[in-house]
């Protein structure tokens, strides 16, 4: 029986479940012959579209791309820059949070986005990117530097 873990005021919604289902569908396409660790992700854009992604590994190991980043890049490359939620699923028995690199890439497109961390059995833990990546590096910091460089020209 799937267990829904609500965290704080965050309860599991039908949209969370739909997003997790999209992540599970994407996970089936994972290319992970080296780690044998299939991951699926799905992002929900502000205008309600869902884009899935899986991890894509390479024989040149460092070229591997995580599932979350594949999903984000698919959304952005189709013209969606505001992401409100991201679901992630692995083959583990408990929900697994995103790696640090993916937290940073997710931050770019929704600093406080909702994270739906799930299992294939349907267990769900709801988290917030703001809690997992407090004080992420964003455009605000960079634009400060760009502004300073422009004013000194
Ligand atoms: N992986 C992801 O897809 N997302 C994460 O957040 C962590 C790790 C992938 C990368 C690699 O293909 C495999 O999981 C093992 O690290």
Image (cartoon, rainbow, N blue to C red):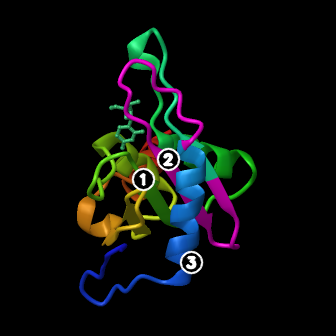
User: Please, what secondary structure does the residue beneath circle 1 have?
Assistant: strand
Q: CA distance from mark 2 to mark 1?
A: 5 Å
Q: Which residue is mark 2?
A: 40
Q: Are discs 2 and 1 less than 8 Å apart at CB?
A: yes
Q: Is residue 48 magenta?
A: yes
Determine which quarter of the picture holds residue 10.
bottom left
Using a 10 Å C-alpha cutoff, classify the residue at mark 1 as few (fewer than 14 neighbours), some (14 to 19) or many (20 or more).
many
Along the viewing direction, whichever of 87 and 109 lies nearer the viewer? 87
Label 2 crowd bin: few (<14), some (14–19), many (20+), radius 10 Å: many
Q: Quadrant of the image for the N terminus? A: bottom left
Circle 3 residue: 15
Magenta segment includes 85: no
Ligand 1 within 8 Å of disc 3? The answer is: no
Left or right of 54 in this view: 79: right
One can see residue 45 in this view: yes
Q: Which residue is found at the position 53% from the left and 44% from the top?
A: 27
Ligand 1 image position (quadrant): top left
Q: Is residue 143 visible?
A: no
Does the residue tagged 2 have its C-beta within 8 Å of any atom of ligand 1? no
Classify mark 3: helix, strand or loop.
helix
Q: Earlier in the sequence, mark 2 or mark 1?
A: 2
For residue 89, the mark is 1
- In terms of depth relative to the viewer, which is nearer, 139 or 99? 99
Q: Earlier in the sequence, mark 3 or mark 2?
A: 3
**Left or right: 9 as drawn, with respect to 31:** left
Q: CA distance from mark 1 to mark 3?
A: 15 Å
What residue do we see at 58% from left, 71% from top?
18
Residue at the limit of the structure toward the front, as seen here: 1
Horizontal and vertical percent for residue 50? 66, 62
Q: Which residues lie in the magenta part?
A: 28-51
């Amino acid at each position: 029986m799937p267990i829904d873990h609500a965290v704080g005021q965050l309860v599991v919604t039908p949209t969370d479940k739909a997003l997790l289902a999209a992540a599970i569908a994407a996970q089936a396409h994972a290319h992970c012959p080296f780690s044998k660790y299939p991951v699926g992700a799905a992002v929900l854009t502000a205008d309600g579209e869902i884009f899935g992604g899986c991890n894509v590994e390479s024989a040149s190991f460092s070229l591997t791309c995580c599932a979350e980043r594949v999903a984000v890049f698919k959304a952005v490359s189709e013209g969606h820059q505001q992401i409100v939620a991201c679901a992630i699923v692995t083959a583990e028995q408990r929900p697994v949070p995103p790696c640090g690199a993916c937290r940073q890439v997710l931050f770019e497109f929704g600093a406080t986005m909702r994270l739906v961390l799930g299992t294939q059995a349907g267990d769900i833990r709801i988290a917030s990117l703001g809690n997992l990546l407090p004080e992420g590096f964003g455009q605000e910091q960079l634009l400060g530097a760009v502004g300073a460089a422009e004013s000194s020209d």
